């Protein structure tokens, strides 16, 4: 039986404490209970009832709701982090400014700056380049294919 390994199954299943309640849900409910106790001690009855309803709703949402298979608190943290540091990068097209430096021996300062226009590739050329990339270089391009066809069919 050498070379056999035991692969853990169901690693994403959380441990249950009591019935369907997991450790994470139990800890969240205990923290919610502590907030309820603090609210009871520090406020009058009407304010406590209002706070208790809010705390209970918040505890239920955080402990039991899942969005896209993730617990709510993980979803909320990912949502907040996506606003703080978005992954979409917007490219603002500008002309490149190029500085030309003269030789050091001349002793003159540089500083001719001017924008250089970029040449654009046609959509046909771009599709050909993407085909070369997609085939891993097996497809050599239309010009190479035409020269190869001429040599094969001319004989």
Image (cartoon, rainbow, N blue to C red):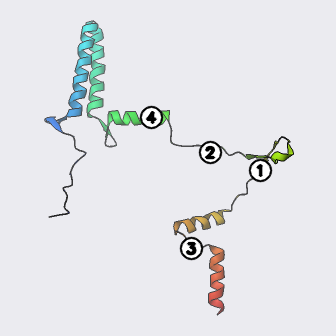
**Residue at label 3?**
139
**Residue at label 2?**
91
* Residue in the image at 33% along x and 33% along y: 73
Q: CA distance from mark 3 to mark 1?
A: 33 Å
Q: CA distance from mark 2 to mark 1?
A: 18 Å
The mark that comes first in sequence, 4 or 2, is 4
State whether residue 32 is above or below residue 74.
above
26 displayed left or right of 92: left
| Label 3 crowd bin: few (<14), some (14–19), many (20+), radius 10 Å | some
The mark that comes first in sequence, 4 or 1, is 4
Q: Position of residue 138 (x, y in %)?
A: 54, 73
* Residue in the image at 30% along x and 25% along y: 58
SS category of the residue bearing label 2: loop
Q: Position of residue 133 (x, y in %)?
A: 55, 65
**Residue at label 4?**
81
The mark that comes first in sequence, 3 or 1, is 1
**Residue at label 1?**
116
SS category of the residue bearing label 4: helix
SS category of the residue bearing label 1: strand
Q: Quadrant of residue 150?
A: bottom right
Q: Nearer the viewer, residue 29 or 7?
A: 7
């Amino acid at each position: 039986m050498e070379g056999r390994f035991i692969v853990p199954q169901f690693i994403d299943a959380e441990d249950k404490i009591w019935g369907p309640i997991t450790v994470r849900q139990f800890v969240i409910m205990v923290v919610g209970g502590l907030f309820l106790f603090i609210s009871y001690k520090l406020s009058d009855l009407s304010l406590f009832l209002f706070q208790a309803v809010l705390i209970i709703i918040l505890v239920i949402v955080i402990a039991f709701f899942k969005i896209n298979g993730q617990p709510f608190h993980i979803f909320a943290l990912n949502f907040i982090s996506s606003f703080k540091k978005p992954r979409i990068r917007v490219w603002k097209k500008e002309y490149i400014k190029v500085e030309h430096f003269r030789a050091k021996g001349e002793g003159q300062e540089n500083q001719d700056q001017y924008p250089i226009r970029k040449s654009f590739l046609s959509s046909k050329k771009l599709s050909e380049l993407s085909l070369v990339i997609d085939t891993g270089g097996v497809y050599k391009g239309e010009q190479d294919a035409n020269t190869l066809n001429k040599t094969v069919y001319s004989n």
